[in-house]
């Protein structure tokens, strides 16, 4: 396995940073009338980021990355469905 194929601490740090930044962005970008849906998505994102931190502490990088991926999947789903009013195409699938 080449080094580029490994889940490194550096990669995980980058994924944590982008996930937490996106989470903060969506919290302040809830579309009017979508508060209930946004609350559910934000809660799920919090849970998956929390899981990722747990797995990282256990040096389980695979499940850490998987949890971060699920967190970001929830974020992107909310952005794509218009639950969050976000425009940044580099951070969100819009």
Image (tube, rainbow, N blue to C red):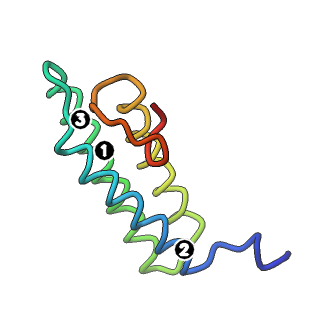
Looking at the image, how many numbered discs can be counted on the residues? Answer: 3
Q: Viewer-nearest of labels 2 and 3?
A: 3
Q: Which residue is mark 2?
A: 60
User: Which residue is more in the foreground, 3 or 54?
Assistant: 3
Q: Residue 1 appears at what percent x and percent y?
A: 85, 75
**Residue 63 higher or lower than 46, as above or below:** below
Secondary element at tag 1: helix
Residue occupying the far right of the picture? 1
Residue name at image x 54 percent, y 62 percent: 65
Reading the image, the residue beneath label 1 is 44
Q: In the displayed structure, would residue 43 be above or below residue 87? A: below
Q: Residues within 10 Å of mark 2 (few under 14, many from 20)?
A: some
Please indicate whether residue 66 sits to the left or right of residue 16 in the image: right
Number of residues whose C-alpha sits closer than 10 Å to that of mark 1, classed few (under 14), some (14–19) or many (20 or more): some
Identify the residue at image location x=44%, y=48%. Answer: 91
Q: Residue at x 38, y 23 (%)?
A: 81
- The quarter of the displayed image where residue 28 is located: top left
What mark, if any, has residue 34 been given in the picture? none
Q: Quadrant of the C terminus?
A: top left
Secondary structure of the residue carrying numbered label 2: loop
Relative side of 50 to 28, left or right: right
């Amino acid at each position: 396995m080449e080094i580029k194929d490994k889940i490194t601490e550096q990669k995980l740090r980058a994924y944590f940073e982008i996930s937490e930044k996106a989470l903060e962005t969506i919290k302040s970008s809830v579309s009017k009338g979508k508060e209930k849906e946004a609350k559910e998505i934000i809660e799920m994102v919090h849970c998956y980021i929390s899981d990722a931190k747990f797995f990282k502490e256990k040096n389980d990088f695979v499940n850490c990355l998987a949890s971060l991926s699920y967190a970001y999947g929830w974020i992107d789903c909310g952005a794509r469905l218009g639950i969050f009013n976000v425009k940044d195409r580099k951070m969100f699938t819009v």
